[in-house]
Image (spheres, helix red, strand yellow):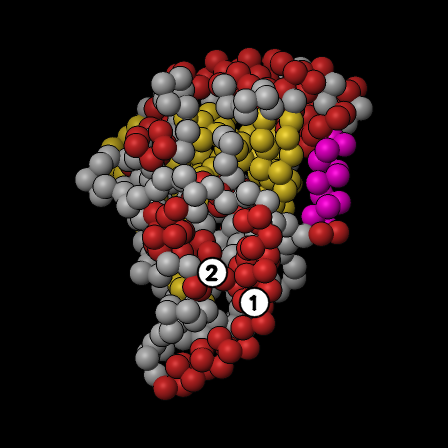
């Protein structure tokens, strides 16, 4: 999965970064921030990817204990313009191979206070891995994950080791080819997918972001009244939002794609994720989301019993040329206007204590799309949901060409979808 993420990054010229933002009512002590940065480098984030010397070899993680760079934006920003910070962050690169793999940024706010942001290449860490790295850093806990020091790629030892490793992987590669043939017979592959290299001169689009903060107890009560779990109610909200912005398939249904964590104790993977897909009827979700809950449970049971569709193909990743990866972009993301819905769950309290207790925590994805790329993909809609204490937060990233291209255009759709599901919250 990590190598697949890296291949996609190099093929498309872009890749997602986790954006974690803490809002403080006071300025941050530079020494405290430096200590937090140094501690982050001692955990799961303290690594970079080193390519195999063989074109078809497996890449590996190597240690990178250097703290991430810190960028200071000293010109105070009005609090109501805080969403504009994402525009500045788009110009701060993170790269899992060349580095930095992660970085910090501090934006001063008018009237005092600041916003602290951490950007992490998604190849290096998914949300659970990043959360664990933050918790370890806040606790001052040094965890040795055993990443080797970088070495000369073309050393005889590495060539020999990767050659043996590639030979051992051949049975898995043959099984993956069989799985690929089965998928092709089912007509899953789409030969008319268009993709190309990005134009490096084309400006990036700041995909609109809206945050909704809901009382977790009130959400649970509303879900209980409807006879479903609170996660199902959030998915119903997502389905209604997709319906309102017009992100539905020809039959009027919403394709919800949910990542499912596969991380275990001591896991060193950057992306320990699988995924499930649930087709939701937004009309039914309006008043009775019980069918949606049944479909969600069935999809999770199928994942446990049969696995997902893409994992059997992972042994082929080292053999995929970049031009083919570009053509497969739509299939990797899921065609037919997918809607990403990441239900992170309750975060450990220390995640909100990067440099003391924060007023507000915001999690989202940041990716450098151009306008042409968003049009080719048919736009995007991604919702991340997480709980901090008694508050449930949903971050909505949405862009629909010709319909939703600004935050002002996205806001009313979010409010209407919230009302559709009987939820109340603060929309920022």
Secondary element at image label 2: helix
Q: Tell me the residue that label 1 is attached to.
A: 174
Q: Is residue 126 above or below residue 344?
A: below
Q: Is residue 312 above or below residue 201?
A: below
Which of these two is toward me, 213 or 167? Answer: 167
User: Residue visible at 59% across and 60% down?
Assistant: 178
> In the image shown, does 10 or 393 lie closer to the viewer?
10
- Mark 1 neighbour density, 10 Å: few (under 14) some (14–19) many (20 or more): some
Q: Which mark is residue 317?
A: 2
Relative to 166, is 15 on the left or the right?
left
Q: Which residue occupies the foreground of this view, 346 or 152?
A: 152
* Highlighted range, magenta: 293-304
Question: Can see residue 45?
Answer: no
Measured as percent of width and height from the top left, residue 96 is found at 38, 58
Where residue 188 appears, x then y in whole percent?
Answer: 54, 43
**Nearer the observer, disc 2 or disc 1?**
1
Crowding at mark 2 (Cα within 10 Å: few <14, some 14-19, many 20+):
many
């Amino acid at each position: 999965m990590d190598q697949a993420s890296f291949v996609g990054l190099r093929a498309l010229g872009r890749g997602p970064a986790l954006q974690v933002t803490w809002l403080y009512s006071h300025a941050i002590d530079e020494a405290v921030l430096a200590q937090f940065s140094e501690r982050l480098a001692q955990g799961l984030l303290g690594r970079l990817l080193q390519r195999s010397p063989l074109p078809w070899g497996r890449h590996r993680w190597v240690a990178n204990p250097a703290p991430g760079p810190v960028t200071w934006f000293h010109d105070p920003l009005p609090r109501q313009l805080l969403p504009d910070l994402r525009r500045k962050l788009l110009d701060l690169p993170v790269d899992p191979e060349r580095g930095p793999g992660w970085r910090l940024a501090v934006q001063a706010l008018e009237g005092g206070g600041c916003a602290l942001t951490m950007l992490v290449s998604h190849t290096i860490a998914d949300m659970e891995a990043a959360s664990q790295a933050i918790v370890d850093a806040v606790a001052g806990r040094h965890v040795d994950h055993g990443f080797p020091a970088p070495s000369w790629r073309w050393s005889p030892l590495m060539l020999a080791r990767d050659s043996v490793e590639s030979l051992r992987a051949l049975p898995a590669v043959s099984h993956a080819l069989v799985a690929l043939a089965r998928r092709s017979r089912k007509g899953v592959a789409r030969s008319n997918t268009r993709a190309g290299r990005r134009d490096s001169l084309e400006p990036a689009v700041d995909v609109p972001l809206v945050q909704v903060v809901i009382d977790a107890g009130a959400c649970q009560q509303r879900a209980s009244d409807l006879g479903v779990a609170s996660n199902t109610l959030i998915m119903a909200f997502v389905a209604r939002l997709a319906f309102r912005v017009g992100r539905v398939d020809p039959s009027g249904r919403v394709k919800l794609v949910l990542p499912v964590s596969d991380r275990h104790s001591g896991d060193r993977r950057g992306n320990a994720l699988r995924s499930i897909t649930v087709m939701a009827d937004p009309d039914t979700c309006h008043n009775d989301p019980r069918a949606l809950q049944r479909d969600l449970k069935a999809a999770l049971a199928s994942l446990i019993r049969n696995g997902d569709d893409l994992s059997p193909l992972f042994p082929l990743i080292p053999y995929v040329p970049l031009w083919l990866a570009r053509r497969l972009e739509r299939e990797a993301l899921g065609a037919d206007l997918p809607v990403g819905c990441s239900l992170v769950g309750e975060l450990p309290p220390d995640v909100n204590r990067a440099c003391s207790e924060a007023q507000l925590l915001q999690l989202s994805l940041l990716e450098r799309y151009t306008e042409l790329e968003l049009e080719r993909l048919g736009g995007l809609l991604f919702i991340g949901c997480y709980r901090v204490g008694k508050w449930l937060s949903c971050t909505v990233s949405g862009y629909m060409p010709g319909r939703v291209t600004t935050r002002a255009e996205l806001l009313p759709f979010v409010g209407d979808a919230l009302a559709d599901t009987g939820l109340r919250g603060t929309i920022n």
